[in-house]
Every structure is written in structure tokens, then in C-alpha cells.
Image (cartoon, rainbow, N blue to C red):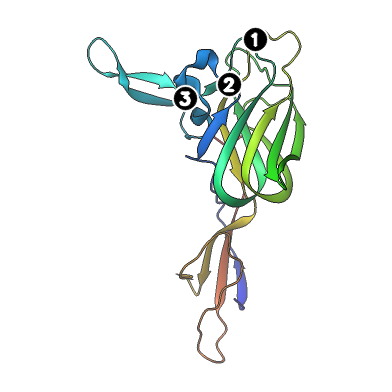
Amino acid sequence: VEGVPVQSDQAYEPVNLVLGKTATASDVYFDNKDYDGSKAVDGVRSYKDDDDRNPDGTPKTKESRWATGDNTRKAWLEVDLGGPVTFNKAMIDECVSWGPRIDDYRIEFWADGEWKTAFAGKGAGANATASFDAVTADKVRLHILNCLPGVTGGPSVWDFGLYMDGALAELQVDGVPVPGFDPGVFSYTVGRTLGSTPVITAKLAYLANGCE
């Protein structure tokens, strides 16, 4: 698309690329499905469990977080992206209700038959973000290498997210959305009247620090 670019005055949050994807974990608190890996990629902090009800018959409200055993010091959360996905930022919302527990960790992606490191960090905490060079993979994992000294409980994570920071959130020509727009596509052909100059509005998405 060629024309006169116009910068948008609005900020857009990119799509969480792991939301609702299949997630597995190396360790789950007492092997309880209420704390399995899927709870870190469902995008909520609590949910109604229709299979577990109160004495009055109403569904119990439960926390939605991945939790590990009390003596766990190393663990990983693996997400199947369902196909090749490009990303350059991760978000870890560690459960710190009893204090932070995660010390060294890595964001890893599967490539060429092995796990490779996209980012190595130290200390997570609530709503921690990690930026790195864009990588493309169909599997990713949060690999917790150890916990902070003196911590007795295992690591727990409310939410884990992957994003493509700076990706297009919306593309318009003369105020009209481009048909078939896809954030992962960067080249379009749009028919215009010969000699006219279209006005192009491209809205980029960025993940703000401390987002939820």
C-alpha cells in the first residue's frame, strides 16, 4: 500500500498469542486440575466451576492460576501455539500473594528440534514483561530454573502471555478498513482511482508495562 501515512493518536494492545491455547506443565500442585497449566493461558483470574458446587447448588468460584508443589524449585509451562507464530514480547504475571518466588527463568521456543532461549531473566513478579528479538515457533515455554533463596512454596503464575509488539492493529485507506486485514501480513494491494493519493492510517499495538 502506498500513500500519505497518518499516525493514529490511540494506543492498541496486541493480541495475546497464547490465549486459550493448549498448555501443559512439568509440575501441578497436588496434581489438582484446578491448578494445571491451562489456568495460566485462560486470561482470567477467577471462574465458576460447574462441576464443583456449594451446598446451595451454586458453582464455586475458584482462582485461575498455575501452581506447583510446595517443594518445587524448578518447573516449566509449555504452550502449543497450534502452528508457527511470531512474537517478540512475553508477560509473566506471577502470583505474589505470599511474596515473589521466581528467581532465574527463561522464555524458550522450539526450533530445529531443540529448545532455544529467546530471553533469560531474573526475578518475575506481578505483570513482568520481557522484550527480545522476534522469533517464530509453534511451541514456547516459560522455564523456571530456580526459586528465590529462603522461599518454601513453589512458583505460581496467574497469567502467561506472548505478543508481537509493534504489529499492526488496524490498517485503513481513506478511513475504510483494508479488506482481509491480518496483523501478520505487511503487504496489500488496494485499487484506487488513477492519479489519486490515498490517506493511509496504520495503528500499531504495543504492550504497556504493568498491563493486565
Q: Is residue 116 above or below residue 100?
A: below
- The residue that label 1 is drawn on is 71
**What residue is at 50 percent from the left and 37 percent from the top?**
22
Is 209 situated left or right of 63 in this image? right
The residue positioned farthest toward the left in the image shown: 56
Q: Nearer the viewer's eye, disc 2 or disc 3?
A: 3
Q: How many marks?
A: 3
Q: Is residue 91 above or below residue 67?
A: below
- Tell me the quarter of the picture where residue 188 sits: bottom right
The three-letter amino acid code for the residue at tag 3 is Ser
| Residue tagged 2 | 95
Residue occupied by mark 3: 64
Residue 45 placement (x, y as % from top left):
47, 27
Q: Which tag, 2 or 1, sits closer to the chain's start?
A: 1
Identify which residue, 169 or 135, lies in the foreground. Answer: 135
Give the secondary structure at mark 1: loop
